[in-house]
Amino acid sequence: MRHQQRLIFSIAALITVGACKAEGPAAPPPPKVQAVSTRMAEFTEGVDTVSTLEASNLVELAAQSAGRILELKIRQGDEVEPGQLLVVLDQAQLQAQLAEERAKAETAKINWERYDYLARVGASSQKQLDTYRTQYFSALERVKATEANVSYSNLKSPSAGTVADVKAKVGDVLQQGQVFTSLVQNNELEARVEVPAVFASRLALGQPVLLSAPGKDAVIATGQVQSIDPRINSQTQGLLVKAVFANTDGTLRDGQRLRTRVQIEAKQELSVPFAAVTQTSGQSFVFRLGSLDELKANPGKADLERLDKASKAGKLPSNAQFALQTPVVVGELENDLYPINKGLKPNQKVVTTNLLNLKHGMPVQVQPAAGAAAISPKAN
């Protein structure tokens, strides 16, 4: 009896296991993905190079007369106004020279007046009178020149600006014409940009010029082309373009070297995010969301028979979406967007997450994207 019971239990167990095998393992749920719509965005064609900023208004300060520095009233970084006293030079030698020139002028005046009297009474010739008159006026000119040199001993600012490196100190002797510092006005800066000559016919005044720090994409300043050199450098085959940048916040500096992009052309193109594009053997792909009917039109290696059965059995909803691997031709990446030259249409949805786990024809669960769900046009 016990043997019969064990046999019945064994047969029942085999029947149960066989039934489970017939049903097969439960299919895993479709992978969860996020998707965005293809949209139009602005893309620019430009020339990328490096340029050095120069202050549009830079004044080199030099001594107009030689002398030892008695007072130095400025230092690097000071803001000065027009007419502000900057340097006082020792005037002792010039003052002595001025006194001597004035004495000579007084002597020449006395001589001229004496010979003027003698000429009137016939005791001197007109030629002698003219000689002493000339000597007197020459002496007056020397007095005026020396007085000017004395005034140059007080060096004043010719314009407003920021004091650059001061290459002198109290006690130093400045020679006439010696540059000891510069005044820089950083409120407007100029970039000298060399553009390949092949772009000569496409350059125009007013085109945008963007500056960014080395190794970074963020634009820190935007200016525009102010002038274009009509000549081409025969050695570099480059064309000199000058661009002007307002610097009201003072973030840019004279002499600063920055990445520079001259925008030749801007146009609206269909785009997808960087995250939506994969590369295989040099070919770019995106996973586009599509229906079962769209999949049937281009099944590839998808198991249509299994998907049809699942759909008819109600295991797939009627509005199920599938990842359709779609070859695309993309342009140059800009602001984390690829322009689409071929392969997609406006308002089609492309997958941006979980791409490594997708295959062509795989059903997916679409979840809302974090933040904005659409591509925004590039902000200038």
Image (cartoon, rainbow, N blue to C red):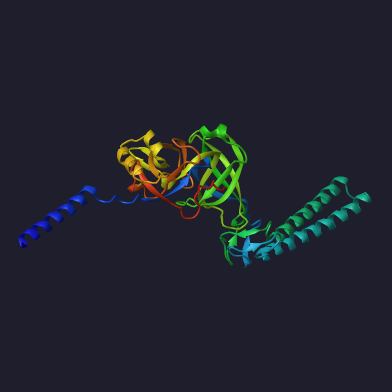
* Residue lying at 39% horizontally and 46% vertically, measured from the top left: 317
47 left or right, relative to 105: left
Which of the 4 quarters of the picture holds residue 306? top left
Which of the 4 quarters of the picture holds residue 158? bottom right
Can I make out residue 326 in this image? no
Can I make out residue 235 in this image? yes
Q: How far across and how far down the image is residue 149, in percent?
A: 70, 58
Locate the N terminus and report the quarter of the image it occupies: bottom left
Judge by depth and name the residue closer to the eye, 76 or 318: 318
Q: How far across and how far down the image is residue 277, in percent?
A: 40, 43
Judge by depth and name the residue closer to the eye, 60 or 287: 287
141 left or right, relative to 20: right
378 left or right, relative to 122: left
Pick out the residue farthest to the right: 121
Compared to 77, does 338 lie above or below? above
Judge by depth and name the residue closer to the eye, 98 or 170: 170
Q: In this figure, what is the number of numbered marks?
A: 0
Judge by depth and name the residue closer to the eye, 212 or 3: 3
Q: How far across and how far down the image is residue 91, in percent?
A: 68, 64
Q: How far across and how far down the image is residue 184, in percent?
A: 61, 56
